[in-house]
Image (tube, rainbow, N blue to C red):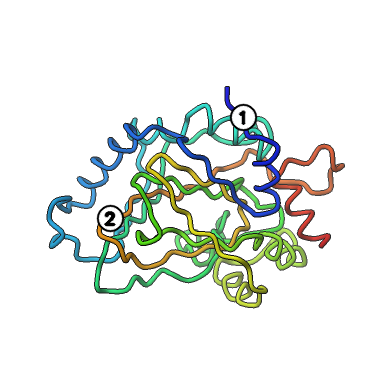
Amino acid sequence: MKELTTEQIDGFIYNGFIKIDNAFSTEIADECRIILWKEIQCDPNNAQSWTQPVVRIGELGLEPFKKAANTSILHNAFDQLVGKGNWLPKVTLGSFPIRFPCKEQAKDTGWHVDASFAGEDASNYFEWRINIQSKARGLLMLFLFSDVTEQDAPTLIKVGSHFDVAKILEPEGEKGLSFMELSQRINTISTRKINVAIGKAGTVYLCHPFIVHAAQNHYGTKPKFMAQPPLLTKKSFDISKIDTELCPVEKAILIGLRT
């Protein structure tokens, strides 16, 4: 079974993400796109039906999505990055932000870190929280179900920004910060190189849960299909362990705090 190389794991620790080509087959990607076109009720052959810059679809647990999320390549990567067996299998995949070439600008393009556990009002995502243990969340994952070039609204990733976020979160303890509180704080992060999450259908980006990222507007011709699910963990991360027992997510948090 194919496993991540030492170089890939180091890239994840220091850059905050890795790109896995052919994480699932193009045939599975094709099946998933057919389902998503039906869900959004747009015509793939009629651009006049693409009236919004982004359409969001919630969790989908149909078989093609389960297959995409549960390949041996990904399962091995999960074990290597968050700790062997310390993750919950994906039975659904979502949400799906589907982006279209459109004159109207998208309104969800701000820099942010995805939250991982509910705040006082679980129904309000802006009140969901993030803490230094990354409670409940092991990874942010970007599943590409269509070919994505630099013109097709690829997700923007601030390389190494997970180190900065660790420093922001550490003083906040177990309570952490809300999605909105952290979004305001990351405006103070020093300039970081920006990576664009491009790739062929079947590509998956596995990102540190603290990575700062953003959507952008679509300037291409073909809609972009992707999912951005979390990988949920069985137990929170613990950076107090001895170094040899730390998984790559934990090592990255500790490096961020030490540098």
**Residue for point 83% across, 60% down:** 258
Where on the picture, by quarter, is residue 68?
top left
Task: Confirm or deny contact between disc 1 and disc 2 (CB under 8 A).
Answer: no
| Kind of residue indicated by mark 1 | Glu
Residue at label 2? 223
Q: Determine whether, in the image, residue 245 is placed left or right of residue 87.
A: right
Task: Name the quadrant of the C terminus.
Answer: bottom right
**Residue for point 31% across, 66% down:** 219
Q: How many marks?
A: 2
Residue at label 1? 3
Element class at badge 2: loop
Q: Residues within 10 Å of mark 1 (few under 14, many from 20)?
A: some
Which mark is first along the chain, 2 or 1? 1
Query: Can you say whether 232 is above or below 210 in the image?
Result: above
Name of the residue lying farthest toward the right: 242
Where on the picture, by quarter, is residue 82?
top right
**Residue for point 52% across, 33% down:** 89
